[in-house]
């Protein structure tokens, strides 16, 4: 099979899976779940099968058609998109296993709709990952928003619908109001919106306009949750936990920072941006978001909301790393997407497992829970250590590269922000870990054990990935160093 | 017998002759079936001609074999083809979907009259588009106007009567102005045939009567086309008309007047009157901009769904006029593409409104809260058409906005201002479309007086819903494959600009 056909298949498969789920859902739940799992595995297999070509320096591409001259729907596999696609499709398998346990144990309604929308969301995520130009990226980005809306509002009660409204309103509003004008502006300046190594805007725009265009892009991509367009993310926490885990720790939010990184690397070009002072504000905005979100997380009692604010901070790590505009930092941004994904999905899985087994959602209820749910809390601990950036976890690797990039650029603000945020991360995660393992349990609490084994299996797997990534990150670094012209020296 | 050369005549004659016959069809349903068949036939004729026009053919037809300029001439080129598609498409699809909605709103015994008036309105609008003769355009304009007054007033809503009276007065003034202008041109050139007029007007030495004529014709047609600030008749007429009529008129009514305005101005006046192009641009461009901004802003605060969409039409007409006022090929083709795309978006929206109206008698937004729960398919179609109205990529509306922005960028003066206006009004469109979405999907259903319960799914009748979805999907289809409207509209632009030096 040629790589072009593989791309076409990757972009069709989730639709067939969705269809298969609808049909299978008519017959039996087990059959439906089997379709989901098989489909997810097939998708991941297809995505990973593109890896050898990519490592060899090839860039398989697929053009669907030209809507208007210069404006085409086209897909192209490059290192950053590959990372995102591989991550989302790979974690979808584990997430499906977890979902089965979660949805059944909590007796959620409309499970078929849930799995269908999940497949559609993955479809949009694949489109985002492989999009070859801004126009295609925008189409898939909007599809992702629309397909995840039914997942966020899954419960259907008034409070949930209200939160879902915030979700939809902010994401659609920013994308149409800011992102789209930025895209039109770019097409007009450069005559194209193709993602090109080294950027396409150099020589077409200068001065303060660069900062303005960058602002339209960065705030237009609301999924990156840079303050002040971050409010949809805590709102989205009303969704069932598997949605928060895969979509709001991996697929959706990473689509946001992924789009921003892609725009900085392939549309502006890091050398051009580095030479343009008006783009310097982005580092400050990201640093502000990191610190502020961490401070807010410090004050959260609800575990999922705490994780949401931690996600906001971690997303801004990626934006900040991309905004350092040095090759090492760009690699750090890409690696952090992956490292954070492993850690955060583990944390969400653990939060969902705690909710399923003990119906506990608040931080202060977690006293002594480690003895009842040792596997879950062990995984939680690994995930939290990764957020802080302690070796031997994934979080350490990406922080290492971001710091290296910051020193390359002599950007002490970034260094300081990372140190401060590490302290803050420790300040809100360590007490939870300590309380869970060492505090005495409150008497007359519910008697419970671990969550269903499917969930425990899933969260153990992602925790293992978090640890493994510390040791086996070579291929990822090698792949991502192709991001920038000339690689990392 | 090869009918192809006769298609321009058949296009008008078929609905016009069928109209009186429909009145005779008394049994329930038969009148509708007959009218639908005729409207579909008319649509097919338009498609057949469009296929030929796409290959570069221009139809000309001498009525009764009398050669122009003495006989009556019909002609169909790329510009007319766009309008023919829009008018006959809206007429045919509207008819196809109309049955349930008309049953609900028009008494049984008056239905054949209603369908007959529908065909007459269609024949009149088509007649305007195919006529190559200034006076015939006036005649057909009167036919279509009279028929549409009847259609608008035909519903159960008594408030339609004052609205239609206002429309009648304004429309008559507009038509009279047009006739005065045509009379003046006739006085100076001695011909009514547009092509002949183009030639003879060059020989006119006394330009003042022509200037006056240009003023009368432009204002008269701007009134008919509801160009801001001459639009005041439109929102009320649209709001109180029967739902299917609103859909039909919103899709094509005003656009035909813009068609005549553009055609007359570009083909007749701009070659004859020195500096007229500048006057045309600097008169219409500010009006278009004001219309776009003011009408969009008003729509944001409008509380009635139909009036909101009607007000938004005024803004969208502004886009069409704005593109024409650029006087460039890019601007004109953006304009003509927008005629096509806006018909798709607005037609789809009003079809969805007709669906909603099956269960919600009161179409104020406050009464439509939570309608997406009872009518999920209707609401989804409405969202798709709404996205097209905003101009979101992947929908037809994006194509024309994109062309318009590109045309604005290519302007020498004020290009940044123009782009800013287009983007600003698109944001306002986001706001008013979001208000509809928010009401339908997130509104609380506490004080809603729908027919029956609000928590079970009761969709509109299937034919209506299917046509609505057909149009909604066409909005997406033409968002990805816009070649048809674009090639027609660039053909139209080159025909129109052929006369400019």
Image: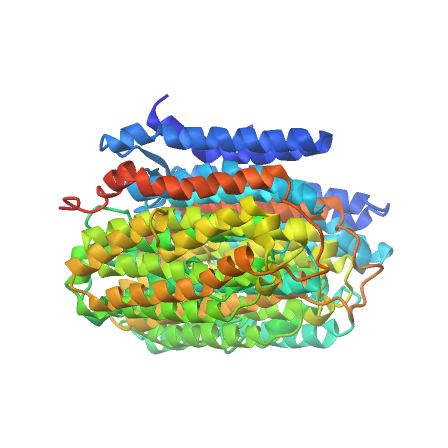
Say above or below: A320 vs B216.
Answer: above
Name the quarter where the C terminus of chain B is drawn: bottom left
Quarter location, residue A113: top right
Nearer to the camera, B448 or A486: A486
Quarter location, residue A408: bottom left
Residue B485 showing in the rendered view: no
Residue B91 in percent (x, y) is at 63, 51
Residue A452 in percent (x, y) is at 64, 40
Residue B418 in percent (x, y) is at 34, 70
In the rendered structure, the answer to whether residue B393 lies left or right of residue A270 reads right
In the rendered structure, the answer to whether residue A464 lies left or right of residue B30 reads left
Nearer to the camera, A364 or A258: A364
Residue A462 in percent (x, y) is at 47, 42
For the image, the number of numbered tags is: 0
Name the quarter where the N terminus of chain B is drawn: top right
The figure's colour scheme reads: rainbow
Q: Residue at x 53, y 30 (%)?
A: A39
Quarter location, residue A415: bottom left
Nearer to the camera, B259 or B484: B484
Residue B230 showing in the rendered view: yes
Say above or below: B314 vs A86.
Answer: below
Say above or below: B414 vs A456.
Answer: below
In the rendered structure, the answer to whether residue A154 lies left or right of residue B223 reads right
Q: Residue at x 59, y 47 (%)?
A: A373
């Amino acid at each position: 099979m040629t790589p072009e056909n593989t791309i076409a298949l990757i972009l069709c498969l989730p639709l067939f899976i969705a269809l298969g789920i609808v049909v299978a859902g008519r017959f039996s739940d087990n059959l439906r779940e089997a379709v989901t799992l098989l489909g997810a595995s097939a998708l991941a297999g297809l995505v990973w099968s593109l890896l050898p070509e990519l490592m060899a320096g090839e860039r398989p591409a697929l053009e669907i058609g030209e809507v208007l001259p210069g404006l085409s729907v086209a897909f192209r596999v490059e290192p950053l998109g590959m990372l995102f696609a591989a991550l989302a499709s790979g974690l979808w398998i584990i997430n499906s296993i977890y979902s089965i346990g979660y949805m059944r144990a909590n007796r959620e309604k409309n499970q078929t709709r849930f799995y269908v929308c999940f497949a559609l969301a993955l479809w949009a995520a694949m489109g985002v990952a492989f999009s070859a130009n801004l126009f295609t990226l925008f189409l898939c980005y909007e599809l992702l928003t629309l397909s995840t809306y039914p997942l966020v509002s899954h419960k259907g009660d008034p409070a949930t619908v209200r939160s879902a409204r915030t979700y939809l309103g902010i994401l659609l509003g920013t994308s149409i109001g800011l992102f789209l004008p930025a895209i039109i502006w770019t097409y007009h300046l450069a005559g194209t919106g193709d993602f090109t190594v080294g950027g396409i805007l150099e020589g077409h725009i200068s001065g303060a306009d660069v900062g303005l265009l960058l602002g339209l892009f960065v705030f237009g991509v609301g999924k990156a949750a840079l303050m002040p367009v971050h409010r949809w993310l805590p709102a989205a926490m009303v969704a069932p936990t598997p949605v928060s885990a895969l979509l709001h720790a991996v697929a959706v939010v990473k689509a946001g920072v992924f789009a921003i990184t892609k725009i900085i690397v392939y549309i502006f070009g890091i050398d051009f941006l580095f030479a343009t002072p008006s783009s310097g504000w982005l580092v400050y905005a990201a640093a502000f978001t990191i610190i502020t979100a961490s401070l807010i997380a410090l004050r959260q009692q609800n575990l999922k909301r705490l994780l949401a604010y931690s996600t906001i901070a971690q997303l801004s790590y990626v934006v900040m790393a991309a905004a350092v505009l040095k090759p090492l930092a760009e690699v750090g941004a890409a690696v952090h997407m992956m490292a954070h994904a492993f850690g955060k999905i583990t944390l969400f899985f653990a939060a969902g497992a705690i909710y399923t087994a003990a119906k506990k959602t608040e931080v202060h209820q977690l006293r002594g829970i480690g003895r009842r749910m040792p596997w879950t809390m062990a995984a939680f601990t690994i995930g939290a250590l990764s957020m802080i950036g302690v070796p031997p976890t994934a979080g350490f690797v990406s922080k290492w590269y971001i710091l290296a990039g910051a020193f390359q650029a002599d950007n002490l603000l970034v260094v300081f922000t990372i140190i401060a945020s590490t302290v803050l991360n420790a300040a809100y995660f360590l007490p939870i870990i300590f309380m869970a393992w060492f505090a005495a349990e409150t008497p007359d609490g519910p008697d419970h054990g671990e969550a269903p084994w499917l969930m425990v299996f899933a969260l153990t797997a992602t925790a293992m990935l978090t640890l493994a990534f510390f040791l086996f990150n070579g291929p990822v670094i090698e792949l991502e160093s192709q991001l920038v012209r000339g690689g990392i020296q | 017998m090869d009918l192809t050369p006769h298609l321009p005549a058949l296009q008008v004659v078929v609905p016009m002759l069928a109209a009186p016959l429909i009145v005779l069809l008394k049994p329930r349903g038969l009148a509708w079936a007959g009218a639908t068949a005729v409207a579909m036939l008319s649509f097919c004729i338009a498609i057949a001609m469009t296929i030929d026009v796409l290959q570069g053919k221009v139809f000309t037809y001498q009525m009764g074999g009398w050669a122009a300029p003495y006989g009556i001439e019909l002609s169909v080129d790329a510009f007319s083809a766009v309008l023919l598609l829009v008018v006959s498409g809206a007429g045919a699809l509207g008819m196809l979907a109309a049955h349930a909605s008309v049953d609900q709103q028009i008494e049984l015994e008056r239905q054949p009259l209603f369908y007959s008036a529908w065909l007459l309105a269609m024949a009149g609008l088509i007649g305007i588009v195919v006529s190559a003769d200034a006076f015939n355009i006036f005649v057909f304009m009167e036919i279509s106007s009279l028929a549409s007054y009847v259609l608008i007033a035909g519903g159960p809503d008594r408030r339609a009567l004052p609205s239609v009276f206002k429309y009648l007065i304004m429309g008559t003034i507009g038509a009279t102005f047009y006739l005065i202008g045509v009379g003046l041109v006739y006085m100076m050139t001695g011909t009514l045939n547009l092509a002949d007029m183009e030639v003879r007007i060059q020989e006119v030495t006394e330009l003042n009567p022509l200037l006056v004529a240009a003023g009368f014709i432009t204002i008269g047609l701007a009134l008919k086309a509801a160009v801001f600030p001459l639009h005041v008749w439109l929102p009320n007429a649209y709001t109180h008309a029967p739902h299917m009529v609103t859909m039909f008129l919103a899709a094509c009514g005003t656009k035909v007047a813009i068609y005549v305005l553009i055609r007359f101005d570009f083909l007749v006046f701009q070659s004859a009157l020195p500096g007229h192009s500048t006057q045309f641009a600097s008169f219409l461009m500010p009006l278009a901009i004001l219309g776009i901004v003011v009408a969009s802003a008003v729509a944001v605060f409008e509380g009635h769904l139909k009036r909101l969409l009607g007000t938004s039409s005024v803004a969208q007409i502004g886009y069409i006029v704005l593109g024409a006022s650029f006087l460039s090929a890019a601007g004109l083709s953006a304009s003509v593409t927008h005629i096509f795309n806006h018909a798709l978006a607005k037609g789809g929206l009003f079809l969805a409104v007709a669906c909603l109206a099956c269960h919600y008698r009161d179409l104020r937004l406050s009464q439509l809260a939570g309608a997406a729960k009872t009518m999920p398919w209707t609401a989804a179609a409405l969202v798709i058409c709404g996205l097209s109205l905003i101009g979101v990529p992947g929908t037809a509306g994006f194509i024309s906005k994109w062309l318009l922005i590109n045309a604005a960028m290519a302007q020498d003066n004020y290009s940044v201002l123009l782009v800013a206006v287009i983007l600003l009004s698109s944001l306002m469109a986001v706001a008013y479309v979001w208000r509809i979405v928010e009401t339908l999907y997130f509104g609380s259903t506490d004080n809603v007086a729908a027919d029956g319960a609000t928590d079970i799914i009761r969709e509109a009748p299937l034919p209506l819903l299917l046509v609505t979805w057909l149009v909604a999907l066409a909005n997406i289809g033409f968002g990805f494959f816009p070649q048809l409207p674009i090639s027609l509209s660039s053909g139209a632009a080159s025909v129109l600009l052929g006369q400019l030096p």
